[in-house]
Image (tube, grey):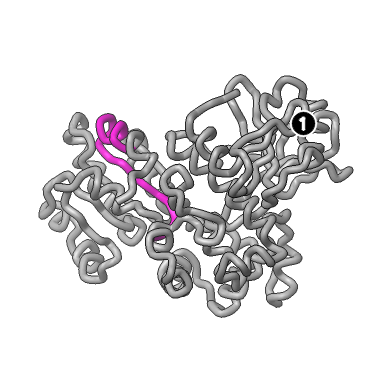
Amino acid sequence: MLDRKIAPVLHSALRRFPAVVITGPRRSGKTTLLRTALPDAEYVLLEDPDIQDRVRRDPRAFIDGLRPPVIFDEIQNTPQLLDYIRTLVDARPRRMGQWLFTGSQEAPLMQGITESMAGRAAILQLLPFSLVETAKADPLLGGFPEVVLHPRGRELWFASYLQTYLERDVRLISNVRDLPAFRRFLSLVASRHGQMLNRTDLAAPLGVSVPTISEWMQILEITGQIILVPPYFENFGKRLVKSPKVYWGDTGLACHLLGIQTQAELERSPFLGSIFEGFVAAEILKSQINRGQRKELYYFRDQQGLEVDFLVPQPNARFWLVEAKASKTVQPSMAGPMLSLAGAAGKRASRRIVVHRKSRTGPAFTALARGAEALTVERFAEEINSGKTS
């Protein structure tokens, strides 16, 4: 079993809060994380129809039959339990780490927690494996634990995952009437991986309205499937674009949706650059949430076409400028956009990094141009997880 980097944050939360909530995409390892941290805790799977029926008929009797600590898996299926558990927490406010919840649907779950458990629960998020958790995670496989540990079955696993996702998560959140069209929508979003979000562009091929696309995008956000990277809000004297860039949160799932099955196919694919860029974006966000920080990532693009892939905020109003390049051969020209933006940002741009794929013969890091450096994605992942800020 592989250790999760968020484990120390979880153990700290268990000592300080009566309840802990872990959100994140389905099958990202939430249940395993909690059961590893609390091996003697009682476990309740709330996707079981019989258990759901018992909760509906007599929630108090159901809770009375449990002995804390208790892990409630997929709490979004029975959110009414939260009100009853709140009364138990308030009756014994000094008993920490007694009520543990997982949920695959962040927005509805957060609404229930806000209404019922405000101030009583620590809220954490778990994403699939990062590079610092396993070197087996890569742009083709992504980071879902079962895919990383059993890569030969990746295509069947992803196909089954999507079917479960459509039948459970999507139907539970929204009354999507045309599931085949929604399935085509998933592949269409994958084909726009790393591009600025254009809802009209997505609506036309599917023959649906722009409001429908907005609703479907919200479903993907709620279930933790996509990353929306907003443009940086400070213009440095430049006119900026306003649309976010969209990425699939797991590049393995993106590759599956694009029909990319092997590393050789990915190498030849026109999507290689955007897939690698999304992999870097996910590594940045994983490093933040695994340290208990809020997710914060931006990109920069002005109306004259100057674009930098990522701005990663750092303490004291500083940030790192990051360019993600799928090439294994790094050229000084790759740092050009970062150096142009750094000229306007001044000392606030504390590091300028080109992140690239590792070569069998090349170094893990190197000076690239004056004021810029090149790091392999493996070395970059180590540095952002170390908490290094300069």
Residue 87 is left or right of residue 356, and the answer is left
Count of number-bearing discs: 1
Residue 93 shows in this picture:
yes
The residues colored magenta run: 10-27
Q: Residue at image x 50%, y 28%?
A: 387
Three-letter code for the amino acid on which mark 1 is drawn:
Ala
Residue 17: x and y in percent read 28, 33
Q: Which residue is mark 1?
A: 369
Residue 289 is left or right of residue 54, and the answer is right
- Considering the image in quadrants, where does the C terminus appear? top right
Q: Residue at image x 44%, y 52%?
A: 128
Q: Is residue 26 magenta?
A: yes
- Foreground residue, 76 or 316? 316
Which image quadrant for residue 117?
top left
Residue 36 is left or right of residue 363, and the answer is left
Residue 344: x and y in percent read 81, 26
